[in-house]
Amino acid sequence: MDIPRAVSFYQAILGIDIEKMEIPRVEMGIFPYEEQMVTGIITKGEGFNTSANGVTIYLNGGDNLQTILDKVDKNGGKIIVPKTAHADENGFFALFLDTEGNKLGLNSPN
């Protein structure tokens, strides 16, 4: 896993600033947070493995996830499932691989 590459990817597709931090044997990219909002951390360390086969985390795609999805391929990721309506017609989702091979999803109302 390449933390600088992963941080650059997420900053580019999400339009956010990610704080880089290192502690002994662990590199991190900390997503912005405020007022206890759900956030995330990209982490590299011994025993941490990237995976497209594990749990899928869905990120908030804003009002229309296509805005983010349009940036995935351009920044080294790969779209697996394009913008698709939920079966209950209550919003949309998409799946992609990041630059490190992790599978993630996006969800949005439009």
Image: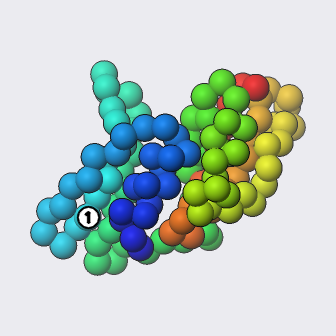
The structure residue drawn at horizontal position 70% and vertical position 53%, both measured from the top left corner, is 95
Q: Say whether residue 58 is left or right of residue 108.
A: left
- Picture coordinates of residue 6 (x, y %)? 44, 60
The structure residue drawn at horizontal position 31% and vertical position 26%, both measured from the top left corner, is 34
Q: Say whether residue 100 is left or right of residue 62.
A: left
Quadrant (top left/top right/bottom left/bottom right) for the C terminus: top right
Q: Say whether residue 51 is left or right of residue 68.
A: left
Q: Quadrant of residue 58?
A: top right
- Picture coordinates of residue 46 (x, y %)? 29, 77
Q: Does the image show residue 54?
A: no
Q: Say whether residue 51 is left or right of residue 92.
A: left
Work out which residue is located at the far bottom of the displayed protein and give it: 46
Image position of 59 with respect to 3: above or below: above
- Picture coordinates of residue 71 (x, y %)? 64, 48
- Picture coordinates of residue 75 (x, y %)? 58, 57
Q: Does the image show residue 51?
A: yes
Image position of 76 with respect to 31: above or below: below
Q: Nearer the viewer, residue 47 or 41?
A: 41
Residue type of the residue flagged with mark 1? Glu
Q: Residues within 10 Å of mark 1 (few under 14, many from 20)?
A: some
The structure residue drawn at horizontal position 45% and vertical position 46%, both measured from the top left corner, is 11
Image position of 57 with respect to 90: above or below: below
Image position of 106 with respect to 3: above or below: above
**Residue behind mark 1:** 27
